[in-house]
Image (cartoon, grey):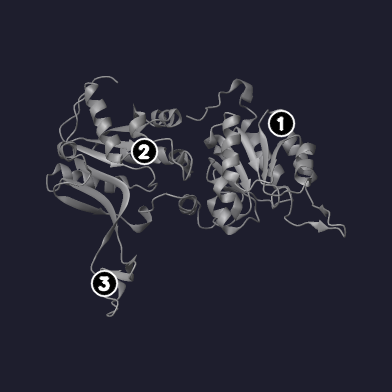
Amino acid sequence: MTTETHSFGSALVVIPARGGSKGIPLKNLQAVGEDSLLARAVKASLAAPHVSAVLVSTDSELIAREAARYGAVVVRRPGEIAGDSASSESAVLHTLDAYEAGGHLLPDVTVLVQCTSPFINPGALNAAITRVLAGSEDVVFSATEDHSFSWTVDTAGAHAVGHDPSHRLRRQDLPPSYRETGAFYAMNTAGLRAARNRFFGRIGIEAVPRIDSIEIDSPEDLAICRAIEHAQAVPLEESGTGGAEGTGQAAFDVDALITDFDGVHTNDTAILSADGSEQVQVSRSDGMGVARLRNRSIPFLILSTERNPIVSARAKKLGVDVLQGIDDKASALTAWLSANRLDPQRVAYVGNDVNDLPAMALVGWPVAVADARPEVKSAARHVLSRKGGQGAVREICDIITARTSQLPTPSTQQHIPHA
């Protein structure tokens, strides 16, 4: 890092972004809209006028590359503070020490920003920093009003928290309470280093709208945020129509394609013979689409829970990889991506039913067929115009082929391995 100084009253943002998330592998690189969660956090932080620099603390090479791409300074996090039990404060304090050791002057305010909050408003972030700079508060964090009737449970049963259940008030008449969003914590730098905790001295709340308060901890949270982002990005007259309109087809640039079988290659129905054998209907046009992908050396995997040998027979016919009889699709997909040295953010997965959601949450391009379950459509960045078994596979292959037709073949491209 080169030596520089900051003007009086500036703020430094620190984003802890380790690579070892277990609930959603490489969660910080999951996309909401066109950008990864990390990119969204960096861009929102840099958009706040008081922020002079953004530092990303990470143990992951993939995350480091993404951070640098969007203008953040990367600070390598040592292994002893990169595990599940490491606190965010430990990452922030280590980052400040490393930054200062590099010859930088620390600013008056340090902000902990967490990229699991994808809807950070730069104006609210800047307002929190302003309050700490003014000296009226030592810490200001983001929170949203909560008018819920809260309860706790112990061995004696359920107990009301903050309200009298025998005198039922209207929600708006409950004493005001706030819920942390986890998005940002603006802190006096000297106070933080002395307390070694994000809460100290005079504490204030920067209230944010409920829509900005969502925090991603599970694949379901990720699906909800993607649906919100999609709804905000698509004009009203186009919402709900599916297909390429408004879903960012121009940015569809991937290195591999994974599909479910039933409901994607087929119409999710079967003909059952008297002897118990099954027949399914597929689209002949899919074969040509897959062949064009093969000619571009783009890996293709069919990932299915179905145990009927017809799945492998179809994969052999198409000349693609297959994993069938898989109950845990997410784990199988993670292993396949690692074995093929593929960056999950540059992979598409096409699904149709709820058992596809965990796998869809792992990739940068979750895709749904036109007749997919509503939950799957909500989790998708792109909804195809064709139904399963009626050319959906051909459609996704054509989209990818069109995008990659002017790009070098994968033999000359570098796949980024897992950190």
Other-residue count near label 2 (Cα within 10 Å), few / some / many at <14 / 14–19 / ≥20: some
* Kind of residue sitting beneath label 3: His
Q: Tell me the distance, in whole angstroms, between the alpha carbons under discs 3 and 2.
A: 40 Å
* Kind of residue sitting beneath label 2: Lys
Query: In the rendered view, does 177 fall on the left or right side of 395?
Result: left
Can you tell which quarter of the image residue 116 is in?
top left
Query: In the rendered view, does 233 fall on the left or right side of 135?
Result: right
**Count of number-bearing discs:** 3
The circle on residue 175 is none
Give the residue at the far left of this rendering: 135
Asked if labels 2 and 3 touch by Cβ distance under 8 angstroms, the answer is: no
The residue beneath circle 1 is: 294
Q: Position of residue 130 (x, y in %)?
A: 19, 44
Other-residue count near label 1 (Cα within 10 Å), few / some / many at <14 / 14–19 / ≥20: some
Which numbered mark, 3 or 2, is in the foreground of this view?
Answer: 3
Residue drawn at (64%, 40%) of the image: 258
The residue beneath circle 2 is: 43
Q: Tell me the distance, in whole angstroms, between the alpha carbons under discs 3 and 1.
A: 63 Å
Disc 1 on helix, strand or loop? helix
Residue drawn at (15%, 32%) of the image: 8
Q: Quadrant of the N terminus?
A: top left
Q: Position of residue 279 (x, y in %)?
A: 82, 52
Is residue 254 visible in the rendered image? The answer is no
